Image (cartoon, rainbow, N blue to C red):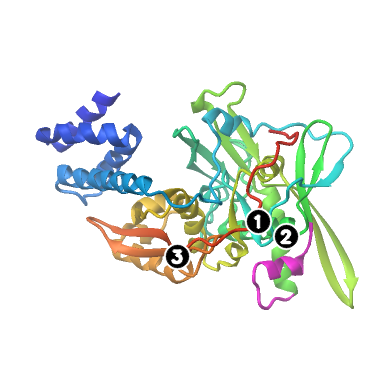
C-alpha cells in the first residue's frame, strides 16, 4: 500500500526527483495524513485551482512536517498536566461495541451519579461530534455524511452516518440542527445542576434524566425575552431530539456481532402543564438515551462551560464543537484548516457560497467575533482568525491565556454497572 501511494503521487505530480521527500513525509506523517493531503491535491486539480501539482503537494506536506517539529519542541518543554481532556476509547473495537444497547426492563432504581460533575460545566460526550448536526438552512429530511471517530491507539474510523433515519431505507424523520445541539447542551447543564440523576435497571441499562421547565430551559440558553410562541417552539425542539435519529453503518470495521447501530439522543420526553401564579407552566421530564447516558456516566466527555449553549450563530457553534477537543489535545499548538476542507469536515449543506473563495472568507469571518469571545472551562481564550493560504483562505485557531486551577472532579470514578 505504501509503495502504491508513492507511485500514485509520482504519477500525478511527475516530480520523480522528489521521491525521497515524499517517502520521508510518508514515514513521519503516516499513510492516512499523506493520503488525505494527496486527496486534497486531486480535488484541487479537478476544480482547476492547481496548475503545479508537485509544488502544491510539497507545500501541504511541509506544513504537516512543520507541525510535527513544533510538537517535538513542546514535548521537550511540556505544559502542566491538563485537568480537562478529550476522552477517547482505547481501540476502535471498544469505541463502537460500547454502543450496543441493553434491554430496558424491570424495576427502576433511581439514584444520583456517585461522583457528580462540578457545577457550572456541560459534560459533552466526545462521541457526539459536529458531524451529528446541520444548519437550519438544510431542508433535507435525511442525508448521509462521513463521520470521523478517533481511538487512543491512533486509528481513525471514517464511518457512514445516516442522519434522520433509524436505518437506511427508513422513512425520513428530519436532521438535528445546531439549534438542537445547543438545547441538548443546556439540558445536560441542567442535569448536572440537579445532581446528575440516573435510572438503573436490573438488565444493566442506565439512563440519565432531569426535570426542566421550558422557561428554565430558555434561560439556560441565555434568552433575554420570550413569550408563549417561543416557548412552544422550544418544547417542539426538545421532542425533535427524541424523534430525529441516527444510524451508524459499521460494516466496514469488521466488528464482531455488530454491523450497524441506530439510536436517538433522547430516550423519552414527558410533558406536564400546570398553573403557577396564574400562568401556564410547562415542565418536561427528559431522559437521555442509553448510549448518551453511558458516555456521561463513564465520563467519556470533555468539560465545557455553560456559555457553550449561549452561542447564537449556528456556524459558530459547529466550529466550536469541532475545534475545541482538537485544541485541548494540541496543548497550545496552533491548528489550521482550509475553508474548503472545513466545509467538508462540518458536513455543511450544499450552498453556492462554498464555490467562491471570497464568499467563503466572508461567511466564516462572520463567526470570528463570537468565537473569539469563547473560553474553555479552565479559562483559556479560543483565538480564531482567517488567514490567506496558497490557494484558499485558512481558519487558524489556538488557545491563549493561562489555565486557572480547576475545582472539578474530573477523575473517572470506579466503573458502575452499565449498558456499555
Question: Residue at label 1?
Answer: 184
Identify which residue is drawn at 68% across, 67% down.
Answer: 220
Q: Give the label, 1 or 2, closer to the camera.
A: 2
**In percent of the image, x 49 and y 63: which residue is there?**
380
Asked if the residues shown at circle 1 and circle 3 are in contact, with their CB atoms under 8 angstroms apart, the answer is: no
Q: Nearer the viewer, mark 2 or mark 3?
A: 3
Tags 2 and 3 touching, CB below 8 Å: no
For residue 297, above or below residue 305:
above
Nearest the eye: 201 or 353: 201
Q: Residue 285: give x, y in percent of width and height.
A: 81, 55
- Name the front one of labels 1 and 3: 3
Residue 286 appears anywhere in the view: no
Question: Mark 3 = which residue?
Answer: 401
Q: Where is residue 80? Give x, y as percent.
A: 47, 52
State the SS at label 1: helix
Q: Is residue 418 magenta?
A: no
Q: Residue 68 at what x, y percent from top left?
A: 31, 44
What residue sits right under mark 2 in the picture? 190
- Asked if residue 215 lies in the magenta stretch, the reply is yes
3D distance between C-alphas at marks 1 and 2: 10 Å
Q: Quadrant of residue 210?
A: bottom right
Give the camera-side residue of 4 and 109: 109
Label 3 crowd bin: few (<14), some (14–19), many (20+), radius 10 Å: few
Q: Is residue 22 left or right of residue 385?
A: left
Mark 1 / mark 3, whichever is N-terminal? 1
Quick one: label 1 or label 2, which is nearer the N terminus? 1
Region rendered in magenta: 211-227
Amino acid at each position: 500500500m505504501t509503495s502504491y501511494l508513492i507511485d500514485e503521487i509520482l504519477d500525478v505530480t511527475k516530480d520523480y526527483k522528489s521521491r525521497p521527500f515524499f517517502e520521508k513525509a510518508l514515514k513521519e506523517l503516516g499513510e492516512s495524513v499523506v493520503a488525505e493531503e494527496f486527496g486534497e491535491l486531486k480535488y484541487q486539480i479537478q476544480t482547476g485551482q492547481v496548475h503545479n501539482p508537485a509544488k502544491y503537494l510539497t507545500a501541504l506536506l511541509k506544513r504537516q512536517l512543520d507541525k510535527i517539529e513544533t510538537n517535538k519542541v513542546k514535548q521537550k518543554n511540556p505544559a502542566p498536566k491538563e485537568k480537562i481532556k478529550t476522552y477517547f476509547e482505547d481501540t476502535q473495537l471498544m469505541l463502537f461495541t460500547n454502543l450496543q444497547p441493553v434491554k430496558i426492563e424491570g424495576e427502576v432504581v433511581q439514584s444520583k451519579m456517585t461522583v457528580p460533575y462540578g457545577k457550572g460545566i456541560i459534560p459533552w460526550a466526545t462521541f457526539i461530534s459536529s458531524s451529528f448536526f446541520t444548519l437550519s438552512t438544510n431542508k433535507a429530511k435525511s442525508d448521509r455524511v462521513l463521520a470521523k471517530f478517533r481511538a487512543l491507539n491512533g486509528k481513525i474510523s471514517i464511518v457512514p452516518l445516516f442522519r434522520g433515519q433509524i436505518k437506511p431505507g427508513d422513512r425520513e424523520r428530519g436532521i438535528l440542527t445546531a439549534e438542537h445541539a445547543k438545547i441538548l447542551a443546556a439540558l445536560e447543564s441542567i442535569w448536572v445542576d440537579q445532581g446528575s440523576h440516573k435510572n438503573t435497571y436490573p438488565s444493566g441499562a442506565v439512563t440519565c434524566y432531569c426535570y426542566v421547565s421550558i422557561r428554565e430551559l430558555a434561560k439556560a440558553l441565555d434568552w433575554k425575552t420570550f413569550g408563549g410562541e417561543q416557548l412552544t417552539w422550544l418544547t417542539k425542539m426538545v421532542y425533535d431530539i427524541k424523534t430525529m435519529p441516527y444510524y451508524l453503518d459499521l460494516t466496514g470495521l469488521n466488528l464482531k456481532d455488530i454491523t450497524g447501530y441506530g439510536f436517538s439522543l433522547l430516550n423519552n420526553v414527558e410533558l406536564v402543564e400546570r398553573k403557577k401564579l396564574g400562568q401556564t407552566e410547562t415542565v418536561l421530564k427528559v431522559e437521555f438515551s442509553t448510549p448518551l447516558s453511558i458516555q456521561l456516566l463513564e465520563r467519556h466527555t470533555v468539560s465545557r462551560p455553560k456559555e457553550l449553549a449561549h452561542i447564537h450563530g449556528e456556524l459558530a457553534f459547529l466550529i466550536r464543537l469541532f475545534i475545541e477537543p482538537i485544541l485541548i489535545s494540541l496543548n497550545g499548538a496552533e491548528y489550521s484548516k482550509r475553508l474548503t476542507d472545513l466545509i467538508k469536515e462540518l458536513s455543511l449543506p450544499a450552498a453556492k457560497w462554498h464555490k467562491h473563495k471570497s464568499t467563503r472568507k466572508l461567511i466564516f469571518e462572520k463567526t470570528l467575533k463570537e468565537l473569539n469571545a469563547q473560553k474553555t472551562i479552565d479559562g483559556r481564550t479560543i483565538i480564531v482568525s482567517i488567514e490567506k493560504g496558497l490557494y484558499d483562505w485558512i481558519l487558524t485557531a489556538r488557545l491563549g491565556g493561562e489555565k486557572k486551577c480547576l475545582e472539578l472532579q474530573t477523575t473517572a470514578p470506579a466503573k458502575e454497572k452499565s449498558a456499555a
